[in-house]
Image (tube, helix red, strand yellow):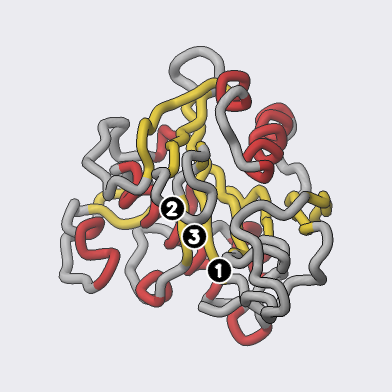
Amino acid sequence: MSTVVPHKPEGPARIPGARAVRPRHAATLILVRRDLGAPRILMGCRSGGHNFMPNKWVFPGGRVDRCDFTAPAASELRPEVQAELAMGAPARRTHTLPRALAMAAVRETFEEAGLLLARPFPPRPAVGGWRAFLAEGAAPDLAALDYVARAVTPSAVGKRFDARFFMADASALTSLERAGDTGELDQIDWFTLKDAEALDLPTITRMVIREIALRLEEPGRPILSFAGRGGGGPRRPAI
């Protein structure tokens, strides 16, 4: 079950007369820390060199890679989370895409913030984006994830994503110490929800933060789905 909320287009405009860009599957992870009094969430500022939401504060995340379909995990998605994600997946990928989305959220959080949502796992060779993660002797703890929201970039924007937002408690991290990052996110820190709302945020991020505040008081709320205003409906995303 989900609740649909409209939102305005945000990002580089599509070239006039050009066909709508196909959205790419993407995933984001909202980490909630509860050991410092009021709940805090992890956020980072996007580099000014990006053409998509430069200098904006966001949660770690990025697009799904092919390696996210095959990399090993220490635990799998809980059945109810798998089912919720499957309802929004293309028919041919209802079994494989939910897991890949979750894997992408965990991988991107490691790449961008140097944090592992993981359990101990025997080191093993890996290719692509999972090589450094698995070399830490850990693999993703997908059972720690909740699915909280989905947002498809409106077709009026020239760079589009079909993003799923996951949430997890920071206690599931192997450590709160950062192991390094790629430099894509700057000034990474933990913020109370009130302080986070005072940052320079994308509209979607601000709306998700407000949803998180409600969800912390009322676990099990319906999945929030953000529908873009204008420019037509979403096309089937590509991997």
For the residues labelled 3 and 2, the Cα–Cα distance comes to 24 Å
Mark 1 surroundings within 10 Å by alpha-carbon count, few (fewer than 14), some (14 through 19), many (20 or more): many
For label 2, the SS is loop
The residue beneath circle 1 is: 25
Foreground disc of the pair 3, 2: 2
Which residue is labeled 2 in the image? 50
| Helix, strand or loop under label 1 | strand
| Residue plotted at (59% across, 36% down) | 201
Q: CA distance from mark 3 to mark 1?
A: 11 Å
Q: Secondary structure beneath disc 3?
A: helix
Residue 142 coordinates in the image, percent (x, y): 46, 55
What number is the disc on residue 154? none
Q: Are marks 3 and 2 in contact (CB under 8 Å)?
A: no
Residue bearing mark 3: 102
Residue displayed at 56% across by 49% down: 166
Residue at 47% x, 69% y is 100
Residue 84 appears anywhere in the view: no
Asked if residue 185 shows in the view, the reply is yes
Q: Which residue is more in the foreground, 180 or 183?
A: 183
